[in-house]
Amino acid sequence: MASRILHRLRHALTGEGERDGLAGCSSEAEEFPESSELEDDTEGLSTRLSGTLSFTSNDEEEEGEEEDDEDIGVAGQGQPPEPDLLGEDTEDAEHSPPTERRGSNLLTRQLQELWRKSRGSFVPQRLLFEVTSANVVSERNSKYVLYTIYLIRAGQFDKAPACISRRYSDFERLNRHLRRRFCGDMASVSFPRKRLRRNFAAETIAKRSRAFEQFLSHLHSLPEIRRSADYLEFFFLRDLQAAQSLTCSGRYPEALATWANAHQLQERLGACRSGHFLLTLAGLAVCHQELGQAGEAHAACERALCLLEAQDSHPLLAPFLQAHIRLSWVLGRDKRQAEARLQRLQEAGGVEMHPPTLKELLIKQPLP
């Protein structure tokens, strides 16, 4: 027994285990040279997602892939380390002299407090981005990974969560446009690099998912970028285009769900005073009205009129007033204030005597 303990002690002192571990790390680094740039490893990400990160392809390597938007690597990250990394000083302190240990613990607490403060102010609006699934999609002549991302308000329960589904080319386009307009701010933002192999392996997809979460979080922490049209439209412009198309073709239940998701996205992103948001309210009002939901349509009109309170020349004002008057009559509510405002606008020559309806404007409104 004693000889066995001595053997283990000698083995530990020679550092053989450490050399073996370094060798293992070296081989992994050759296969994934960028992996050290991520805050979390693949196993940690999969555990955090609790099984919601799904992979629908094999782990086989894809040679000669023609879908260039999946030739990506793992992101370099410029964010603060996680608390467990800062806590490593505590383990070493157990084997240190008492004075040294007290100093180490104090330093660790100071670092952790600094981390908490920086983390708390990193995303001013407390908006989190979480990749909940990453599925391989095979189409006629292409194959790509579609990432589903939820926008979550920290510390709140969302009854109607907002989500988007994007592929690498969408992220790459956003990154390119932002770097062109905000080269100074974007200098500190890392973006996943391209790869030539193992694009559809589960491990690679998990690392990319984490990289995209961090990419969006970093962008959202920069005020100028967070308010830019390129950043905002990345999230909801596609939903608006789809909702408009569904509304024009009379598929109101599907259109309503798409308008509602666009509405949730804009609320979470703080984009509730734009023309896009008024168009979204118009879409909600039209779809609710077509589905016989007069109360919900009336509420959408009321919110739009509150936003247009100081704007007498907006092209959507008269249609919203008309819809509000008609819905108020159906619901038996007071419509005199809306009628008086519409009459004043018509007498001042600000609007036509017979302005187009919300539905007509919605169909004609061009979206980029």
Image (spheres, rainbow, N blue to C red):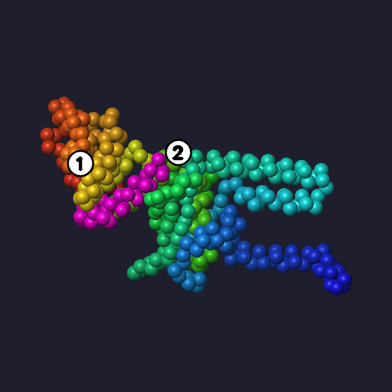
Left or right for 42, reference 111: left
Q: Nearer the viewer, residue 58 or 89?
A: 89
**Residue at the image point whose x is 67% and y is 43% from the top:** 111
Which residue is situated farthest in the right direction here? 2
Left or right for 241, reference 163: left
Q: Amino acid at mark 2?
A: Glu
Q: Residues within 10 Å of mark 2 (few under 14, many from 20)?
A: few
- Residue 279 visible in the shown view: no
Q: Position of residue 74 (x, y in %)?
A: 53, 58
**Residue at the image point whose x is 25% and y is 44% from the top:** 295
Residue 309 sits in which quadrant? top left
**First to last magenta residue range:** 243-270
State the residue position of label 2.
Answer: 224
Q: Pick the quarter of the image with the N terminus.
A: bottom right
Asked if the stretch drawn in magenta spans residue 349, the answer is no
Disc 1 to disc 2: CB gap under 8 Å: no
**Residue at the image point whose x is 61% and y is 57% from the top:** 36
Number of numbered discs overlaid on the protein picture: 2
Asked if the stretch drawn in magenta spans residue 246, the answer is yes
Q: Amino acid at mark 1?
A: Leu
Which of the marked residues, 1 or 2, is nearer the chain's N terminus? 2
Q: Nearer the viewer, residue 162 or 74?
A: 162
State the residue position of label 1.
Answer: 331
